[in-house]
């Protein structure tokens, strides 16, 4: 017997998401819960995979099961597929495990032909509706199933609309629609050489194939790559009895969320469009009204819907995204799924649901994605600058606040051009009449999206919210002309390339740039609550990478429990100090060098005093100077150019002499591969004076702040160690300085000496290093560079992104830790470091410290803390809690 | 009871080398074998270490044991230490485990003072001799024990010598010597403020301390560093009854080898100096005569000595280096040790001794150091060029052929200046009147050594032979004036910096440069025999790194069993091909690029045809293009300079435009760390056309040569892999090309695809890589760079040599594999690669493939072969045999 490839809705349930796809499982669940769902069935994702596996053929028995299921639907509806008198029409929709909004194909009104068309007209007593449905089928079928160019269809439609007074779809007369159908059929025949198929089973079979095929459509593949979804899921196909929202003013269609997807407010939120089919809402072709207006127009239907919505939310224990249609006064549910929402809404909903007793704290924490917390911390416009812009008259329009956040960039009116401009390094705002799935690449390359048409549930809005992009939608004041590359608004013309600013939180659109400012984290109460629950759950500590007191204070406000990486080189770059640094580097003797080091000491001490004050009571891990010395000198290339020019002109012999001297030093210090040259502890070993000065400054600062009552815990980190002798010698030298300073100052402070593990050899010889290190901090940036042999500066631009695109690498190893290779070294070093020193303090201060997948790894491998940039601290707190939950 | 710190010679034996030092153990062994050895005792190396450990104090009981042992010596000699009538005089000499010629201190004639001096004069009936001995003691004691400046002593001596007719030491009269003694004592007092010590026990104690202290003398420390000897051995001190070769013409002193240390000829070889003390020979102050002359002068002594020499060689089963003194017609043996010898001599002696039945083949193989085989392969002068130079009159002098090999370089007359000049990149010949241990640094920096004075056993000769440096010694025709920086020879003046050439094999000295040529390996029968024995013993295969047919042929003659690394980039650098390469790189489209690749294909095919022919029947492993493309373009710096200059002068707008275009491309391709940038398989993945062309060329060459009857075995090596997908994709693409070419050509050839393991991640993920690799070749150069984070280009010049000097690293990891770190990765990859593919072919093609210690590691880890440069192949064959012997 053949496998079961097809399930009636009544045969499925919510747990069969992998087999039936999300939409299919939802329809089945609703059907079995007794909700008014138009009957139908689902062709499984396995059928889809079998279809691809056999070289694009339906698997054995599938088509027979489709036919048998159609019989069942006929029985449930009393209609008959292809019957000229009482025709059954169906929609054919995709439905994968995860929602991929708008990424795959749908065909509506399957089952209409010249015969059934007449039956439908008679049955509905609405010839206009029947022809409208038919022309939709022909166009959709042509585009989706046969991949013909859709523009001629639009031209025909627009030609007739232009002849009406209102200019809208609904203004078309029956005769016009009859003519349109004829013209559509002619286009179809002209382009394909055959007639539009009259055989309804043929229509159905080809529609199912088209949906299967759309799984590997360009849009879907791109979407999956961006969202890191696997290719081997396949899609289900849902064949469902058509219900019609376009059968008159007692009909309509709507989309709603059980809570507000922007704010999280516990109130039904959605839109309704009278006398329309569902895709009219989603495509944003007509702008719908708020769902609250349905309450006035049809309170019975509204209340029935409200009850169903509440029931579904309780049933699924999450906010639901619902699609429904009213056909001649009867409500049908077409879809329920967990609703996408903004980060702020997600957090509010999670916290509210805990307070409502619907879910536990752990569930609430588990439900929030780290990326959502990150989105919460996106900048908004500086209110004063925004006020000033408004007063200057730069506020040019207001649309729907479709996805929150603020963005400034050059307006680009085409998705491909937006991608190109972004690749060239520009901040881009994509501006479109409306967006389609073809525009997704361009949207994701942009800093924000602005559309002329479409509502809060239009394609643009849904994609933007899902991707944390600011979006203003349905800004109908604008006239967006992609061909002319112009936006006209109230007499003003904005050309492509001009800078505009959009505020997705308010829907405002400005000309010109507006500076953005940070989120006021302290006022985000729901987030604070959620993160406090995360703190209860997590085992990993969360430290921050901070070089300045202001960063340290900010990170502490974000919940950082220490500084995991304080880099000491920034001070060498500050203008007032730079001359001493240059002189120090150019010194010919140790004595001369010491003179300049002595001048630098007070500056550096001051830096540390500020840091210790900001982190009163918390550990501060300070890395001694790491970059190569030539980074503090002018570049070799610029000097060669200047020297050549001065020699040629003969203008300024003194300047020439000076530049030549500098060039000689720079050439002497030049390195072929500076990343692996004279830097890190190697400099300290060659010129001990430098790190001795730093240690002196650190301990002087620590002792003096201690005397002022500040609780100082300092850990000195020696960088780029690959042999234990480097560490041993530096530590011996510097610990002597430390002790000497503490004696001079008459204060003892809490301190440790340790090392960064950032060369493969450091990791491999952890057992030896641990003899001399009281702590390890994994510098996973450099460790990744050396383990792969990828110079990040070169690799990301030249080949790494292409590697990720082509799936040569599963992800960018500088963003998410390569657990197979680099992770193996980390795990080895943890295990072997502990063999020598069981209580060794272990942490990580590379960029991976803020990456959720990497944090999960660091949890599993047993580190004490992760350290990340201040803005990533809340994200890391949540991710650490997730790690604890998922690795219980 | 105190430990035993002192052993009489009669209490020791040859097996006590660690405790008594080499010299002490040898003296003990000879004493117990009944040879005429002047009585004495040895203070142990442990006493020396205890001395340092206790802060430079004799350990408890040592001094008492010295006194007691002296009593025993007094009894054996019938003399008494400090007795004015029958005084016992002793020498105090160092003696560590390994011979460190001239590196540590010796004091002779200890026991002489104003009283015993008279006794010695009376007893020897030779006042002149007594005073001569006394003045030697004062000078030596002053210099060695008290570290006073020796120059005033020399000035006094020279002043008196100048008053004699002959001008030699032996021409000094008794009265002169008496005056000299007085002046010496005055110098001593003037410099130290105290009188020369009259207490002989005081002399002895301080002399012993001085010898101890010389273990950490600068020369000894440098020598140990160069020869990789540990500091914690300590030195023994040998106190031995003085015998005097300077008691008249029936006395003398000599140094001899049981076989010729230059050629290995089985014939006594040495030198004898009448009426002289041993240091006169060693220091090369007077030039001695050949030992054969002793046969005429004193056949009885000569024959006695010859018998003893033969006996000692049989006893030790090795060629012996003997020191002896004849005192008034009586022969005394002062030292025996295994003699240092040239590489050629070592090999001949080992082979001869096998043939003589003295040692086994395995012993013979084990006895030859790989470095000796290396020395054998040193170049010699092109005979025609040398003949021409001689005919031109460039042959300016002839000295002793003290250490074989030929060298050309600038003459430098001072060791420090020689070091500096060598550091600056010059080939240097160090030219000195004679050398002293202070000159060792300069000698080792030079390409060769030339001395005016001294024989084949002089300091210069011994050090040069030990270091495989060509040396011409005792070239008395020269007048070497370090102050004036001039060499005068027969009216010709050579200034410091002028180029000279020396032939250490013949003793010839030339002005000007003479080209060198390779050793005729085929004619080195003894070496061939020895290596054939090594081949019987070794398990590791020895392949070669060869890019050209001529290298391949040479390596094959040296015994290479395959090519382990054929680099394919050289062809890109050849002038006729370079324009195509540049055009290929600058191509904007794939089509354009392909056009130039097509032009390169025949060149590359030709390269491989030659290689396959040379390696007929043996495997050839070819690495696809590895370096970054910008290496084939002009340097960024030179272009900036030219463009700036052209812009400034405005002279040549066309050239400027061209250079600007080139600069734009170069800037676009510039990399911060090219070692870890776009190179290796990354280029192949980005531009598949390139490696496809290479593969096509390889297989076309292979097929065509096969048709000509050549047996082709090719292995394609994909470089710089860090993720298995890189390898998988490249292999898939290229194997397709391979199959296509074989089909086109109608021939199948034996081939494999594999990868280099040269990134840490490659090693860590060997188990995955082995799925796609039929062989691994460890690229330990890059692997070392990335594992340590050392860019070799930068590290060696900037800090690595200092790291080795300061013992931060035990050795340069680019010369000898870092077994702890890098080796761990190699071992891991071997183990895990085999898990996936048990029969995977494993080899190594980094420079470590020619390093004996590394070869030992590769044997242990179970590789199939090592691959090294052609000249290292014989060395590797021997080292591989050693590895097999030592890891039985």
Image (cartoon, coloured by chain):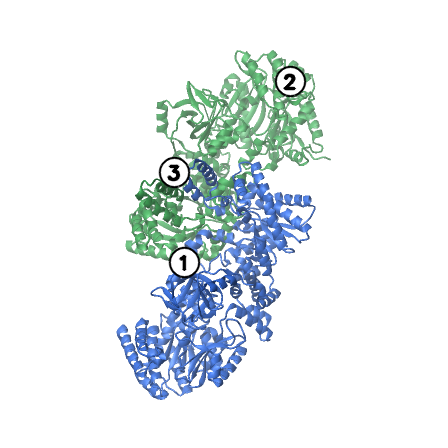
Chain colours: A blue, B green
Which mark is in front, 3 or 1?
Answer: 3
The answer for how far apart the CA atoms under marks 2 and 1 are is: 88 Å
- Given residues A501 and B763, the one toward you in this image is A501
Would you identify the image quadrant in which residue A166 lies? bottom left
Residue B497 seen in render: yes
Determine the chain carrying the residue at label 1.
A
Q: Residue B441 location in percent, x, y?
A: 52, 31
Q: In the shown orientation, is residue A91 left or right of residue B317?
A: left
Which mark is in front, 2 or 1?
Answer: 1
Tell me the number on the disc at residue B410: none
What residue is shown with label 2? Answer: B186
Task: Check the image and report above or below for B622 versus A431.
Answer: above
Mark 3 or mark 1: whose residue is earlier in sequence: 1
- Given residues A836 and B346, the one toward you in this image is A836
Determine the chain carrying the residue at label 3.
A
- Given residues B349 and B854, the one toward you in this image is B854
Element under disc 3: helix
Q: Residue A758 location in percent, x, y?
A: 53, 51
Q: Residues within 10 Å of mark 2 (few under 14, many from 20)?
A: some
Residue B330 seen in render: no
Determine the chain carrying the residue at label 2.
B
The answer for how far apart the CA atoms under marks 3 and 1 are is: 40 Å
Element under disc 1: helix
Task: Check the image and report above or below for A216 versus B176.
Answer: below
Which mark is in front, 3 or 2?
Answer: 3
Q: In the shown orientation, is residue B450 left or right of residue A148?
A: right
Report if the CB atoms under discs 3 and 1 are less than 8 Å apart.
Answer: no
Q: Residue B876 location in percent, x, y?
A: 45, 41
The answer for how far apart the CA atoms under marks 3 and 2 are is: 69 Å
Q: Quadrant of the N terminus of chain B?
A: top right
Q: Are marks 2 and 1 on the same chain?
A: no
């Amino acid at each position: 017997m053949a496998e079961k490839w097809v399930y009636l809705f009544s045969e499925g349930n919510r747990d069969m998401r992998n087999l039936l796809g999300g939409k299919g499982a939802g329809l089945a669940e609703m059907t079995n819960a007794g909700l008014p769902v138009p009957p139908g069935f689902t062709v499984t994702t396995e059928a889809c995979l079998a279809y691809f596996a056999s070289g694009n053929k339906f698997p054995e028995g599938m088509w027979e099961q489709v036919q048998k299921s159609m019989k069942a639907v006929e029985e449930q509806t009393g209609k008959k597929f292809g019957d000229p008198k009482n025709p059954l029409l169906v929609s054919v929709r995709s439905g994968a495990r995860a929602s991929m909004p708008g990424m795959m194909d749908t065909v509506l009104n399957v089952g209409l032909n010249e015969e059934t068309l007449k039956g439908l007209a008679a049955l509905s007593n609405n010839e206009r509706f029947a022809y409208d449905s038919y022309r939709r089928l022909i166009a959709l079928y042509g585009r989706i199933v046969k991949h013909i160019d859709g523009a001629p269809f639009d031209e025909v439609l627009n030609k007739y609309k232009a002849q009406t007074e209102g200019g809208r779809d609904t203004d078309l007369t029956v005769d016009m629609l009859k003519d349109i159908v004829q013209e559509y059929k002619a286009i179809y025949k002209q382009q394909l050489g055959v007639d539009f198929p009259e055989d309804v089973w043929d229509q159905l079979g080809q529609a199912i194939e088209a949906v299967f095929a759309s799984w590997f459509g360009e849009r879907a593949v791109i979407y999956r790559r961006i969202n890191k979804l696997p290719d081997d899921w396949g899609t289900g196909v849902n064949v469902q009895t058509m219900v019609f929202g376009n059968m008159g003013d007692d009909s309509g269609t709507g989309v709603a969320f059980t809570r507000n997807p922007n704010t999280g407010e516990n109130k039904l939120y959605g839109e309704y469009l009278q006398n329309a089919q569902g895709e009219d809402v989603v495509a944003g072709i007509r702008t719908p009204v708020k769902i609250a207006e349905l309450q006035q127009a049809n309170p019975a239907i509204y209340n029935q819907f409200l009850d169903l919505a509440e029931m579904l939310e309780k049933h699924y224990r999450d906010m639901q995204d619902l699609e429904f249609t009213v056909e001649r006064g009867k409500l049908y549910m077409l879809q329920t799924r967990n609703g996408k929402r903004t980060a702020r809404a997600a957090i509010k909903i999670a916290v509210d649901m805990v307070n409502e007793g619907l879910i536990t704290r752990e569930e609430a924490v588990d439900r929030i994605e780290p990326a959502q917390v990150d989105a919460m911390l996106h900048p908004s416009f500086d209110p004063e600058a925004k006020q000033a812009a408004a007063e200057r008259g730069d506020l040019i329009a207001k649309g729907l606040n479709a996805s929150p956040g603020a963005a400034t960039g050059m307006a680009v009116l085409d998705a491909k051009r937006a991608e190109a401009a972004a690749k060239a390094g520009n901040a881009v705002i994509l501006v479109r009449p409306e967006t389609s799935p073809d525009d997704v690449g361009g949207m994701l390359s942009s800093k924000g999206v602005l559309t002329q048409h479409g509502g809060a549930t239009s394609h643009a809005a849904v994609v933007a919210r899902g991707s944390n992009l600011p979006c203003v939608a349905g800004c109908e004041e604008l006239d967006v002309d992609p061909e002319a590359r112009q936006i006209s608004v109230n007499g003003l013309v904005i050309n492509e390339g001009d800078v505009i600013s959009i505020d997705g939180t308010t829907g405002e659109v400005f000309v010109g740039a507006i500076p953005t400012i940070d989120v006021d984290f302290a006022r985000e109460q729901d987030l604070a609550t959620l993160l406090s629950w995360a703190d209860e759950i997590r085992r990993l500590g969360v430290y921050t990478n901070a070089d300045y007191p202001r960063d340290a204070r900010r990170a502490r406000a974000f919940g950082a429990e220490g500084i995991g990486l304080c880099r000491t080189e920034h001070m060498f770059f500050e203008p007032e100090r730079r001359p001493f640094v240059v002189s120090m580097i150019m010194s010919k003797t140790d004595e001369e060098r010491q003179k300049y080091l002595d001048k630098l000491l007070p500056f550096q001490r001051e830096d540390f005093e500020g840091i210790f004050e900001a982190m009163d009571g918390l550990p501060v891990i300070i890395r001694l100077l790491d970059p190569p010395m030539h980074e503090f000198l002018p570049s070799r290339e610029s000097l060669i150019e200047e020297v050549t020019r001065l020699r040629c002109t003969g203008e300024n012999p003194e300047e020439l002499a000076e530049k030549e001297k500098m060039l000689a030093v720079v050439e002497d210090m030049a390195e072929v591969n500076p990343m692996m040259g004279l830097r890190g502890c190697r400099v300290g070993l060659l010129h001990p004076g430098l790190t001795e000065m730093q240690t002196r400054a650190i301990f002087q600062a620590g002792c003096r702040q201690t005397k002022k009552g500040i609780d100082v815990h300092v850990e000195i980190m020696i960088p780029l160690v690959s042999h234990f002798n480097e560490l041993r010698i530096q530590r011996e030298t510097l610990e002597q300085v430390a002790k000497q300073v503490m004696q001079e100052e008459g204060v003892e402070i809490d301190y440790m000496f340790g090392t960064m593990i950032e060369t493969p050899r450091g990791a491999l010889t952890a057992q030896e290093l641990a003899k001399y290190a009281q702590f390890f901090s994994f510098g996973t940036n450099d460790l990744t560079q050396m383990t792969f042999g990828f110079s990040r500066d070169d690799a990301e631009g030249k080949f790494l992104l292409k590697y990720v695109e082509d799936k040569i690498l599963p992800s960018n190893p500088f963003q998410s830790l390569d657990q197979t290779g680099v992770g193996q070294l980390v795990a080895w070093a943890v295990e072997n470091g502990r063999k020598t020193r069981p209580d060794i303090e272990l942490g990580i201060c590379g960029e991976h410290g803020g990456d959720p997948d990497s944090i999960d790894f660091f949890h599993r491998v047993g580190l004490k803390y992760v350290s990340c940039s201040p803005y990533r601290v809340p994200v890391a707190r949540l991710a650490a809690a997730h790690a604890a939950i998922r690795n219980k």
